[in-house]
Amino acid sequence: MAAVSLSVHNNTWAKYFKGKKIHGEIDIKVEQAEFSDLNLVAHANGGFSVDMEVLRNGVKVVRSLKPDFVLIRQHAFSMARNGDYRSLVIGLQYAGIPSINSLHSVYNFCDKPWVFAQMVRLHKKLGTEEFPLINQTFYPNHKEMVSLGEGSGQEGKASCLLQ
C-alpha cells in the first residue's frame, strides 16, 4: 500500500510507518514530498496519475505513482511566492484519493477568515463558556487598513476610521 506524505522535508514520516502493516499483512510504503514536488492528473472516470520529483544521485528525476492514500502536513496555501497548491488539493479530491486528514478541511484552511467564520458560528451556538473565542474584525478589502512599520504583510495592521 502506497502512502504519500505531503510535508516539509525536515519531518520524516516514513519512520513512523516503518514496519507497520494494515490488518497485519499489508506493508505501508511511504513516499514523502512537498506540494512543490508534485503534479497530478485526474480523470472523471476515476483514473489518476501522480508525478513526484525526487533527488536520485544528486539529479532531479520524476517518478509516477498511484498512492492509496495521502497524509497532508503542509499548508496548501501561503502568501509566499508560488505558495498556492489549492489546485493539487482539488486534484486529489477529483481523483478520489483518500486522505487521513479530510481534503475538505485542508481546502477550507486555505482561507483563514472562512475558518474563523465557522468558529464564530460555533461560538454563537455554544456560548463563550463552552467555546471561547478571541475577538476579531473582518475587513473584506484593504481600504480601511493601514500597514505600519516594516516586516511581512501579515504584521503591523491597524484599522482607520475614515470620516
Image (spheres, rainbow, N blue to C red):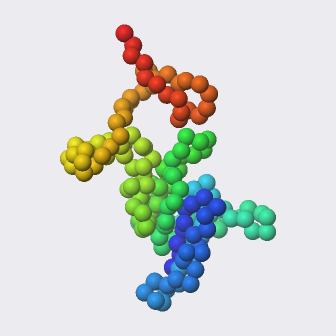
Residue 97 horizontal/vertical position (percent): 44, 66
Which residue is most to the bottom?
25
Question: Residue 86: x percent and y percent?
Answer: 48, 50
Residue 158 at what x, y percent from top left? 46, 25
Q: Which quadrant: the C terminus?
A: top left
Instruction: Decide which of 104, 138 is in the foreground and name it.
Output: 138
Q: Is residue 115 left or right of residue 38?
A: left
In this rendering, the answer to whether 92 lies above or below 115 is below
**Up-down relation of residue 66 to residue 80 (above or below):** below
Identify the residue shown where x is 55% and y is 75%. Answer: 16
Residue 26 percent location from the top left of the image: 49, 86
* 160 sits left or right of 50 in the view: left
The front one of 4 and 132 is 132
> Quick check: can you spot residue 118?
no
Name the residue located 53 percent from the left edge and 44 percent from the top edge: 78
Whether residue 160 is visible, yes or no, is yes
